[in-house]
Amino acid sequence: MVGRRFAASWIFLAATSLSGCSQAINLYHKKEGGAIAQNRQPPPGTNLPYPNLADVPAPQPPAAPGAQAAITSQARSGVSAPAPGALAGLSLPEAPPPVPSVPGLTIQTPNVNAPAPKPAPAPAPAPAPKPPGPAVGVAFAPGSALLPAAQQSVIQGVAAQRQDGFIRAVGFGDGSMALALARARRIADALTAAGVPADKIKLDAFAAGSGGFVQLVY
């Protein structure tokens, strides 16, 4: 009797402690908020009716012995030719079927006897670019960008050979980039005076070297 009372009291204390723990967890979840504080969703499918076993299809009967081997052999051997009498009653039409008359629709019957269109001729290859002409030197006095009169005739001779190409005017500055640029501009001025358009002159300057040169480029 005493043992039963002791067991009953122990069960009551355990249930009380567990319920208190559960309430503490619920209070913590509500305090934290968010998805954890929401009620648990019901499991999926609880609102669906129970399945009817009568709807389950009956199992298929087993295949005849050797059926799978026959299917495999037919797949490996490929498509066989039809029997000689299978195509006895077939005949090909001699003319295409008539085109239906539909208001507002025009259909042209293709002419199968028309010759095939000739391919378009291949475009002619572009001409190869001409190589640049030789560089013709232009002499300047040391440390000067003044163009001597004798050198102007040299520049005029190169300008007379130009057709539609460009002329390169290059100046060297004896170690000075400013002097090299001044000499290149003097050569360009002489080319312009000889009738070369300004947009047909390519200007280059290099600090190393002395003098300059003109060159036909295409």
Image (cartoon, rainbow, N blue to C red):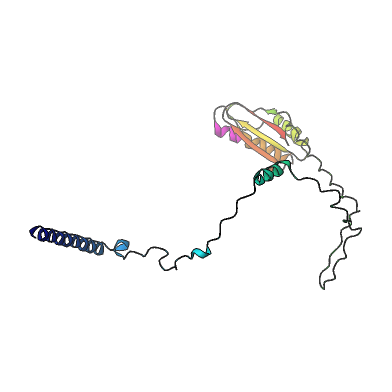
Residue stretch rendered in magenta on the structure: 175-182
Q: Main secondary structure of the magenta part?
A: helix
Give x and y (percent) for residue 81: 80, 46
Residue 78, picture quadrant:
top right
The one nearer the camera, 207 or 3, is: 3
- Residue at 76%, 33% in the rendered image: 157
Give x and y (percent) for residue 63: 63, 50
Q: Is residue 94 left or right of residue 188?
A: right
Say if 211 sits above or below 76 in the image. above
The number of numbered badges drawn on the structure is 0
Does the magenta run of residues contain 55?
no
Give x and y (percent) for residue 61: 60, 54
Say if 218 sits above or below 65 in the image. above
Q: Quadrant of the N terminus?
A: bottom left
Does the magenta run of residues contain 177?
yes
Q: Quadrant of the C terminus?
A: top right
Q: Is residue 34 left or right of residue 54?
A: left
The one nearer the camera, 205 or 1, is: 1
Give x and y (percent) for residue 12: 15, 62
- Residue at 53%, 61% in the rendered image: 56
- Residue at 58%, 30% in the rendered image: 173
Residue 36, picture quadrant:
bottom left
- Residue at 48%, 66% in the rendered image: 52
The one nearer the camera, 23 or 155, is: 23
Q: Residue furthest left?
A: 2
Say if 155 sits above or below 116 in the image. above
